[in-house]
Amino acid sequence: MHVVWAHDHTFYFNESGKFYSGGKLPYAVWERYLSVFDRVTVACRGQKTGPSADMQGKTLSSGPNVDFLVLPSLSNPVNKLTKRGYVEQSLIEVIRTADAVIARMPSEIGSEAIRVARQLGKPYSIEMVACAWDGLWNYGNAQGKLYAPFALWKTRRLVKQAPFGIYVTEQFLQQRYPLSASGVQGSCSNVEIPAPAEDVLARRLQRITSTMLETNRMKPFRIGLIGSLNGRTKGIDTALRAIARIAKTSQPFELVILGDGSPEKWHAYAARLGVRELVSFQGVLPSGDAVFQWLDELDLYIQPSYQEGLPRATIEAMSRACPVIASTAGGIPELIEGEWLHRPGHVKGLADLLQQAIGNGAWLAEQAELNFARAKQYTKSKLDQKRMTFWQSFRDFVASDDVHPDARVRAESGTYTKNESKGVEAL
């Protein structure tokens, strides 16, 4: 069975024909689908690189039974007018020969794939991984804010009509983007971690005890954050402003940030706030052990995001028994206790929580144990079973007579009526 997976994610590719991801979508992700389906075509954005381009920090996404359809971005008004026809035709060609569509939402390419699937009578499922409103409203410019209400309405409508839908949260996204009463709903984080060894917690508690010793109190308390430096959705501005508020009233600390993108504007911003010497931007690391080792060297992890689904970095930090302070964005309250959360963009709220946490050995140890226990819910073995159960039910639906057989015939022959096409455009 052949499925088309559609999303706005940008992959990097070169003349070898291999595709790479910035860490979020390695080939291991496609193996989740390939355990149920035979073949996956990834409809996405792409960036061609030279043969000598440095792929450090990126992971190989190419592999057996996976191919890629590179499409132009539809995330700006000009491209929506000039490129949409090409995107639609490209999707028609690939979806017509596929059995089903999986649209990761919110995304412009995912939305177009849903419209084409409906037009061709193909079954589809949505994957909700984030909130369209939160992402655009906090994008950082007027264009994003203007588009946010329409994107919210459009995404809600597309999701409401979906026959199947799986969410990365347990409650947040389901409440904001509900399926219809007849839709088949699942929930499963798209973040999975290896089962953490028990000595991870032991080493963390030992580190906390060590940092509380009088001889070590003057060593900088190490606060970490993982997030792209492009845009402001990860709340880097909130973090910098918060540490500026407490820089002279706390024991020594430093903020280290891991993420792709140029740090120049953030260097300048930190300098204007007077905290340039307290902040280090450390680029990107390959996912897996390298990131886990980086997390092990932190004393506290923060996730002051404006927009999230269920953040991978937070769960990974928890799996390393790292204490966490975060915002209330998206599904984060499903991970962290409310008293250690602040409103997105609330600088004073984050600063106050940081002051309570830095050097507080009892609290650090308590949070280390809680987070380590909670993270076990996101081990690969547990999530694989939940995910496979959902996709097997979708596969059975695709293969059943419930998917209108007359629509299948028209899709395979490439014929459908003008009225049907108009109905799709009206969505």
Image (cartoon, helix red, strand yellow):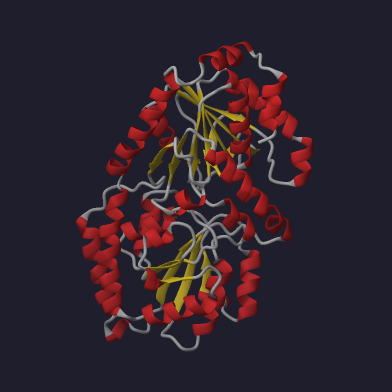
In the rendered image, residue 146, in percent from the top left (x then y), is placed at 71, 56
Is 410 or 203 nearer to us in this picture? Answer: 410
Residue 9 shows in this picture? no
In the rendered image, residue 167, in percent from the top left (x then y), is placed at 44, 45
Is 291 or 177 nearer to us in this picture? Answer: 177
- Quarter of the picture containing the C terminus is top right
Please give the name of the residue rendered at 31% of the width and 59% of the height, measured from the top-left corner. Answer: 320
Relative horizontal placement of residue 287, taking residue 232 as reference (left or right): left
Is 190 or 240 nearer to us in this picture? Answer: 190
Is 22 or 76 nearer to us in this picture? Answer: 76
- Quarter of the picture containing the N terminus is top left
In the rendered image, residue 413, in percent from the top left (x then y), is placed at 62, 10
Furthest residue in direction bottom, as rendered: 249
Please give the name of the residue rendered at 43% of the width and 86% of the height, measured from the top-left corner. Answer: 250
Q: Is residue 399 above or below residue 86?
A: above
Please give the name of the residue rendered at 24% of the width and 62% of the height, measured from the top-left corner. Answer: 201
Relative horizontal placement of residue 65, taking residue 420 as reference (left or right): left
Residue 162 shows in this picture? yes
Furthest residue in direction front, as rendered: 181
Q: Is residue 40 above or below residue 181?
A: above
In the rendered image, residue 419, in percent from the top left (x then y), is placed at 70, 22
Count of all numbered marks drawn on residues in the image? 0
